[in-house]
Image: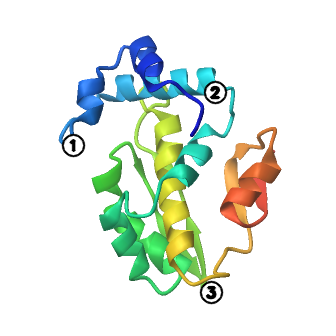
Amino acid sequence: ELGLDPEALTRTAGVDRAVIEDPDGRLPPAAVLALWNQAYRASGDDHLALRVAASIPPGAYRVLEYLVACAPTLGDAMAKISAYFAWIDTSATLPVVEVDGLFGVGLEVAGPPELVPLRAVEFTFATCWAKARGLTRPGDTPARIDAAAPAPRDVARLEGFFGCPLRFAA
């Protein structure tokens, strides 16, 4: 569906497919980083994490989906995800703040970028966001998203995924 060859990706990244296919298997951060970097190179897609997150079928993450389906709003869903994010990804946190009825979600990496698989963190966040948006009440979207990162080339694609305007750091 994504046009990538999983055998070639894992072989080129030096990752053992048996570990990926084992439900109890865990890849070290360096292997995750190598795999995502190879996938980005092979795809040529700057927003591969979004594409992969959007391709995950309903029911693939049952616990996450149950967690967000029980939330009345997108903000409540993201707060629930934030509370349990360490169970999903230990390399980042999702602090949630609420001010005057508006919520904000941060994505804070827990380590130096060269040791943290940032593309995997982006995928995890995108997956959580997609599940939260899809399972909370329709039309419940933020007014905008502010990102501390510089603007990428294709902002429109990001805005389409997140369902609102994005504002980036200069």
Percent position (x, y) of residue 166? 76, 58
Instruction: Say the numbered circle drawn on residue 23.
Output: 1
Image quadrant where residue 46 sits: top right
Locate the N terminus and report the quarter of the image it occupies: top right
Three-letter code for the amino acid on which mark 2 is drawn: Ser
Q: Which residue is mark 2?
A: 43
Tell me the distance, in whole angstroms, between the alpha carbons under discs 3 and 1: 42 Å
Decide which of 145, 37 is in the foreground and name it: 37
83 sits left or right of 132 in the view: left
**Helix, strand, or loop for circle 3?**
loop
Locate the C terminus and report the quarter of the image it occupies: top right
Tell me the distance, in whole angstroms, between the alpha carbons under discs 1 and 2: 26 Å
Q: Which residue is mark 3?
A: 100
For label 2, the crowd category at 10 Å Cα-Cα, with few meaning under 14, some 14 to 19 and many 20 or more, is some
Percent position (x, y) of residue 89? 35, 48
Three-letter code for the amino acid on which mark 1 is drawn: Pro
Decide which of 95, 25 is in the foreground and name it: 25
In the displayed structure, 34 sits above or below 136; it is above
Q: Is there any visible trace of residue 107 in the rendered image?
A: no
